[in-house]
Image (cartoon, rainbow, N blue to C red):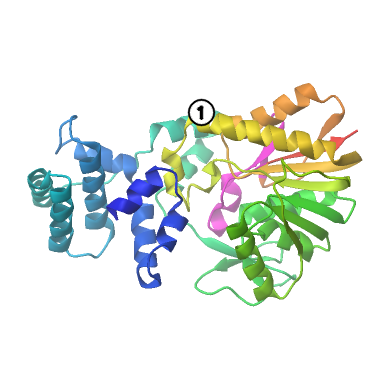
Amino acid sequence: MFVSIKKIGQGSSIDYVVSQFPAVKRNFLFLVIQEYYRNYENNNKILLNYVHDKTPKNILILLKICLTLLYFSSKPQYAIVNDAVEEGKVLKKEKLVNAVLRNILRNKNKIKYGKFIYPNFKRVLDKIFSSDSIRNYIYSTLFTKPKNYQISLIDNQKAIYKKRVFVLEKKIMKECFVQDIGNFEVIYSVRKFFKDKTLIDLCAAPGGKSILLDSFGFNVIAIDNSQSQINKFKENLDRLNIKINIQKIDFLKAKFTQKYNSILLDAPCSALGTFRRNPDVTLKIDQSKIKKHQKIQIQMIEKSLKILNKNGFLVYIVCSFHPFETIEVIDKVMRKHKDVKLHKINSDKMIKRQSGYFINPLSFKELGGSDIFFASVLEKI
């Protein structure tokens, strides 16, 4: 667990780290690691009463793992302490680890978990959502296990939303694929702009948006530069028994001789909007890294506009609510390009903020919540 947390802190995703373990261990690890990051700031507050401010960082990580296991798992207390002390020996701080954990156990019933949120995450979120009701709801969703959704390829009257969306309980239903309801809403709402049914989906893998557009009757050309993500895309296509043209292409480096009327750009981003399922992103708000994302996002929009025909539509999407990756990206593009026009997205599930639209987290509260996506529709005029 300690090594896993270190890897995630260095940039790996929870999904990737957990996937490296035997299948029998993955579910337990996934749930515990999620709780570790959901309660990161809570654990920091608790440890203030048991350690001093010069405690080594690795020891703090180890103690926060132990707190998570003590309060959010069924692992026996003695096993948690014994494992931690053994890890403490490697770090040459076993006496400190043992003493702190024994002290915590003596007070275990008195320790109460609050709902403290990592300050940087809260600061960014509050910039976009000014409504107290939205803010308070988002704060609370960080501490609850999110619902997962599956999307049907065909209309189904039993669906909970738009005849397509179902809650994913244990097993994916036949002719369904996994996709967040907020993601579905974005594609459902912007698809009408694509008059030309031949559409190129940039950064397409692992394929949810391409598959959904295919189900709406589009002829999708899907490109991506990640072979591992393309492999997941192909697995989904094989399971669903559908065919989509997938090409391994580095979009920014590739030369295109053809132009398109319909382009979907789901650009690489910080994934801040997926914090319910990936709570580690709340700690990874690094301004310099997000600025690098912004540079790539703008480059991808610039190139997309070059291969977009006049009167064609480009839809820009990110699963983030950071201003650097959303509003600011589109503002910079619009200041440079006078031949581009923004369009209104007609969805009562989205909130307009300057140059684009964010999924309103309250929209799907009764159905189980959603991730937060940003979308902007650009027409070349």
The answer to which quarter of the image holds residue 247 is bottom right
The kind of residue on which mark 1 rests is: Ser
Residue positioned most to the top? 335
Q: Residue at x 57, y 66 (%)?
A: 167
Q: Is residue 334 visible?
A: yes
Q: Is residue 145 visible?
A: no
Q: Is residue 379 magenta?
A: no
Q: Residue at x 46, y 57 (%)?
A: 15
Q: Is residue 352 magenta?
A: yes
> How many numbered circles are shown?
1
Q: Residue at x 67, y 30 (%)?
A: 329
Extent of the magenta region = 350-374
- Residue 200: horizontal and vertical position, in percent? 80, 52
* Quadrant where the N terminus is found in the figure: bottom left
Left or right: 69 in relation to 373 = left
Left or right: 307 in relation to 12 = right
Tell me the residue that label 1 is attached to.
288
Q: Is residue 339 above or below residue 27?
A: above
Q: Is residue 123 above or below residue 223?
A: above
Mark 1 residue crowding within 10 angstroms, few (<14) / some (14–19) / many (20+)? few
Q: Secondary structure at mark 1?
A: helix
